[in-house]
Structures are given as C-alpha cells and as structure tokens.
Image (tube, rainbow, N blue to C red):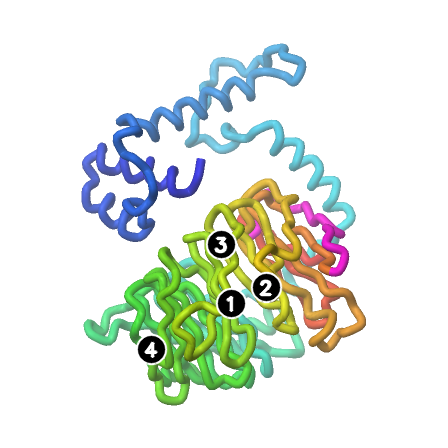
Amino acid sequence: LTSDELNYLVYRYLLESGYTHTAFSFANESLVTKANINGADVPPGSLISFVQKGMMYVEIEQHINDDGTPIDAGEEKLSLLLPGHVQSRDNEDKDETNDAMDEDGMEVEPSKVTTLSGHENEVFTVCWNPMKSLLASGSGDSSARIWHIPATESGPEAERNTQWHVLEHFNASSNEKAKDVTTLDWNSEGTLLATGSYDGQARIWNEQGKLVMTLSRHKGPVFSLKWNRTGSLLLSGSVDKTAVVWDTKTGDVVQQFHFHSAPTLDVDWRNSNSFASCSTDKNIYVCKIGEDQPVKRFVGHTDEVNAIKWDPTGTMLASCSDDFSAKIWSVKQDEPLHDFRLHTKEIYTIKWSPTGPGTKNPNKPLLLATASFDSVVKLWDIDKGECIHTLARHTEPVYSVAFNPTGDLIASGSFDKCLHIW
C-alpha cells in the first residue's frame, strides 16, 4: 500500500462521511487528486473494510501461538482504543531484545539534561549555530526560537541561565500568525538564520532574533532551505515544485527552477553556483545558476525521493527514497555508484560523516548513515560499498540522525520518544 493509495482511501472516507471541507483541504495538501488512481476501481467504504480486515488479522495473531494452538484471552474483544491491544508478537520480541540491550547502554541522568521549554506545539526542526553556543528551533506554533545555551553546564542550572529570542512568523498581509516553521539553516558565519514556513515564505533573521528580510516567491510550503558556503545565496525548495536561488543581500530572486513535476522535498548545494534537488516525482536534478536546463538528471528511484546530500568533496550525491533504497550518484555517469537495499521500509533521511577527503578528519573512512521507518539506522562504508553497522535499538521509525564533529559518535531520534547516541 503506497502513501498515495492510503491518502486516497482517507480522502474517499472523508467524502463518503460528509466531511466535504475537510476532504478538500486534505486533497489540496496531499495532492491526492493528482495521483494516478482510478476512483471507479475503489469501492465505497474501502478504508473501513481495510481496517476491519486488519483488526481481524491482528486478533487472530494475538489468539494463536506459533505452533497453531489457541491462546485463552478470555472474553475481552480487540479494540484500537485500548492500550496494548494492537501489538504484534514481533513487537513483543523486539521489546525483550531492547530490554536486554539496555544493559549495554548508559541512560543519561535527568539532572544532566537541559530542557528548553517555551514552544506551544510540536518542534519540527533544530539547528546548531556553527560558531556560537546558539540553538535554533522551528515549531508548529508559528515560531522559531534562538536559544543561548550555557557552554559550561547542563541540567536545571543551565535551564535557569538559558536566554532565548522568539521569532514570530506573521503573514505580511493580514498580520496573523503564519503556519508551521518547517525548516531552518544558519549561514556559515553563524550571523544569520534562514527559516522556511508552511505559508510559502522564507525569512532571514539575525542572531538577536530580528527579522532582516522576507523572501516571497513560492506558491506553496517551503520544505528545505540551504545557504551556500559564502552566505551570498540562499536556496529553497517548495511544494510548488520549484527551487529558488535568492540573493541574500538584496532579497531578489536570482533564478527559479521549474524542472520537477511534483513537490520539491529537498535541496543541497554542490558548490557556490550549482545544487541538486529531489522530489516526489522520483527524479533528482543537478542544476547550475544561469542554465535553463538541468546539468544532470538521475533516474532510478521508484518512489518519492525524500532527501539528498552531497559528500564533503561535492563529487558524490547520496539520496534516499520511499522505495526502501539509498543510492550514491556521480555526475560522471547515469547509473548509481552504489545501490543500498538492506532497509525493509522507507528511508527518511541520510547524513554523511564529517570524515574522509575534504574534511577535518581526512584519515578516517567516509561513511553514510541512513535512517528508516523500519526503526533501524545503518552505516555504510562508501569505499567498500557495504553496510558495516546496523543500529537497531529503536522501536519506531527513525526520523533524524547526526554525527558529532569528529565522526566518532552518531545520534538518532525516533518516534519511540528516545534519543540514542552510538
């Protein structure tokens, strides 16, 4: 079942239930009406039918042992609304494994954790300042925050000494709060912060939280923002299918690229004047400022491409997709250098290690981390083209990974509410 198919089932359920306005809003944001699905082939009540059949399957699984003998569960009926009722035996086994693995790890004491409180809704993204002890965060409460983190202490003492600036995102026309802050990025000098929002605007702020300029050209939510290395240009990718390069001194549009046929999910600079973009249209384009056509098109993924990232030298491009694969590309050839297919579910994000040529740790091997909905993080040796580590303590999809500056440690964050450092 693909994400488009599931979205269509939800859309049809809303329509059939009389939630017309909700169905319209959902269709507009999910682009489900543009999916290649013939509605005549989908019978009424399909979503309810799928859920009922799924519950029947889970109920059977919960009442039969591996050897086929029945389990006496009493008279209690299965329910989606009661905790623990929809838990497969696979998850039970995984819980036992994780409990055993916890003995090898060390849990951080609460007194050593600094909690930054203030956002009134989900926090979608965070980014450290490259030069100072400042942390930026973006939230669904229509704001970003810049936190001044004490460098010498942690825990309650640091919380009391932490100062912050609130970066409220307002619509210029109505002066009402804008929508979710979806992405943010510091320039290389750490003096300016760029934020992207669901209202389709990009904004630039100084480190004191003052709005420097608002960049308006996109017609849909901005999902990705990247400064170039010199800080003279800002690159943004949007649901409106385009990527825009901005002059950060004037706020003018240098060039808008219209190559994708579906929402642009991620963008990344290769050097000072060329970049790559990826989309739900399954394509990856390498673009150059001043050129009207892509420099290169990478075709190979069979589902949405969620993230892309150039290696430290700008010679290899990593990509990950809903097709369960991660690929390494070179502009010198059409076929991928490596095609990594050991994950069993969608791969949400990727990160290169700060090691190997072009980094401050040139004598260490270059690695790629992939994080997936299969609850696993995998580390790949690029020279050997093989997986060298599988990090499997999470119990829910892994949405975020990050290396420390030396490449010796990697952090992973998951829907299971845990942060692991490996």
The three-letter code of the residue at mark 4 reads Leu
Relative to 127, residue 214 above or below: below
Q: Earlier in the sequence, mark 2 or mark 3?
A: 3
Q: Is residue 399 magenta?
A: yes
Residue visible at 39% across and 80% down?
246
* CA separation in Å, label 4 and label 3: 26 Å
In this view of the protein, which residue sits in the foreground, 259 or 49?
259
The residue labelled by disc 2 is: 317
The three-letter code of the residue at mark 3 reads Val
Task: Assign a secondary structure to mark 1.
Answer: strand
Q: Earlier in the sequence, mark 1 or mark 2?
A: 1
Q: Earlier in the sequence, mark 4 or mark 2?
A: 4
* CA separation in Å, label 2 and label 3: 13 Å
**Mark 1, residues whose alpha carbon is within 10 Å: few (<14), some, or many (≥20)?**
some
**Start-end of magenta stretch:** 383-400
Image x and y of residue 236, in percent: 41, 71
The residue labelled by disc 4 is: 215
Residue visible at 28% across and 68% down?
177
Single out the mark in the foreground, 3 or 1: 3
Relative to 249, residue 357 above or below: above
Task: Assign a secondary structure to mark 3.
Answer: strand
The three-letter code of the residue at mark 2 reads Leu
The three-letter code of the residue at mark 1 reads Val
